[in-house]
Image (cartoon, rainbow, N blue to C red):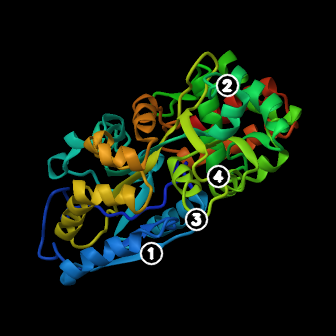
Amino acid sequence: MRWTRAAGRGLLVLAVVLSGYVASGARAGETGSGGRGPLTLATAGDLTGYLGPLLRGWNRAHPGERVTLVELPDSADETHAQMTTDLRGGDRGRFDVLNIDVNWTAEFAAAGWIRPLPGDRFPLGSFLKPVVRTARYDGRLYAVPYVTNAGLLLYRKDVLARAGVPPPRTWAELERDAKTIAPRYGLDGYAGQFLPYEGLTVNAAEAVYSAGGTILGDEGARVTVDSAAAREGIGFLARGLREGWIPKAALTYKEEESKQAFQDGRLLFLRNWPYAYAVASARGSKVAGRIGAVPLPGRDGPGKSVLGGSNLAVNTHARHPDSAARLIAYLTSERVQRQVLTRGALPPVRAALYDDPALIARFPYLPTLRAAVRTAEPRPRSPRYDQVSLVVQAVVHDALTGRQTPAAAVRRLARELDAVASR
């Protein structure tokens, strides 16, 4: 989303147009007399401004199937709150189709808010394989991937070149460089997104995964977080804040705030989604031409990112199913997916685009991103994901601010997640 909703901005990083396909009858796949007509699309805010022109192109070509865009707040948490409030209201609600963070699919499907979709209507075989898994719940397809994402480590390649060191591959190397090199150049060492919101859940999950741990298993039915790996991952972040190579200001950072700090030349290293690389490389940026991107470091080598991005889901009570299917075909076509990248700086789900030499020349991080997506892990999957995320945010934030030790925080996290799972 932000992406992750990263992430969001997540991930969500995570702020894109959406649409979907849904049946007008009781079964997914049925088409009734209302199969074509206008649609209302709900999405988080469009950070890069590409969405309006893209939809205007659709509306000019399909005047009888015009799409009205509803942009919700930039925050993944606020977007989730507004969507779920509308969906819980019953009847048709305001939104026909929804652009949802990849980790909301299970929650929305389990609640009956979105319908299963016929996979043969969409080019799933042309997508990166991991992204298709995010669209399934309980063995069925409940959404269609539209944008993917994985966290990367952005770094000042000019500074590391002067210091004569390569970009870090492990936590030990990251910590060493953040402590020793950054201060020599008047920079803070490292930052992620550590405000207690969805982005903190992403950063915490990546730290646990990169140490070899997990948080939940069996679609949220089993709590697995109480482990040495989780203590080590959360402890790595807490130590950085305690020792100062992660600045205290990072406790207030979401995606945009952290990107701005890096773009303004205040950070040596930044964990963020690829959009931050594109924006920080644009004309006018203080660090344009001086940044690189590598996979996130881990305990013993390259770490694991959380798989971010967004899926296109369909309100159970949506109108005009045939128009929704046609719009999905448009949004997932190779031509439009190319524009999602070139205009929106958002990673496409079409695998072939990651091998395009012209795109790689313009977006040099694409091979690194593809590798990160292929090894990325989803956030903890649960039909009660909103509650899971709130627990992770609260507990991990207490560890990062020193209110609890990492060991105590992990024990508390296990207890509170077990209470969520048993409800």
The mark that comes first in sequence, 2 or 3, is 3
Q: Is residue 333 above or below residue 233?
A: below
Q: Residues within 10 Å of mark 4 (few under 14, many from 20)?
A: some
CA distance for labels 1 and 3: 12 Å
Name the quarter where the C terminus is drawn. top right
Q: Nearer the viewer, residue 323 or 344?
A: 344
Residue at 70% x, 38% y: name it: 159
Q: Are marks 3 and 4 in contact (CB under 8 Å)?
A: no
Mark 2–mark 3 CB contact (< 8 Å) = no
Q: Between 414 and 203, which is closer to the camera in this rendering?
A: 203
Q: What residue appears at the point 19 percent right and 78 percent down from the top-left corner?
A: 61
Q: Earlier in the sequence, mark 1 or mark 2?
A: 1
Pointer 3 local density, CA inside 10 Å: few below 14, some 14–19, many at least 20: many
With 233 as the anchor, is 385 left or right in this view? left
Measured as percent of width and height from the top left, residue 88 is found at 47, 65
Q: According to the image, label 3 marks what residue?
A: 74
Describe the element under mark 2 as helix, strand or loop: loop
Going from N to C along the chain, the mark reached first, 4 or 1, is 1
Q: Secondary structure at mark 4?
A: loop
What kind of residue is marked 2?
Val
Residue underneath mark 1: 70
- Residue that carries the numbered disc 4 in the rendered image: 287
Image side of residue 176 versus residue 345, left or right:
right
Q: Position of residue 179 (x, y in %)?
A: 82, 30
Mark 3 vs mark 4, foreground winner is: 4
Q: Position of residue 111 (x, y in %)?
A: 42, 52
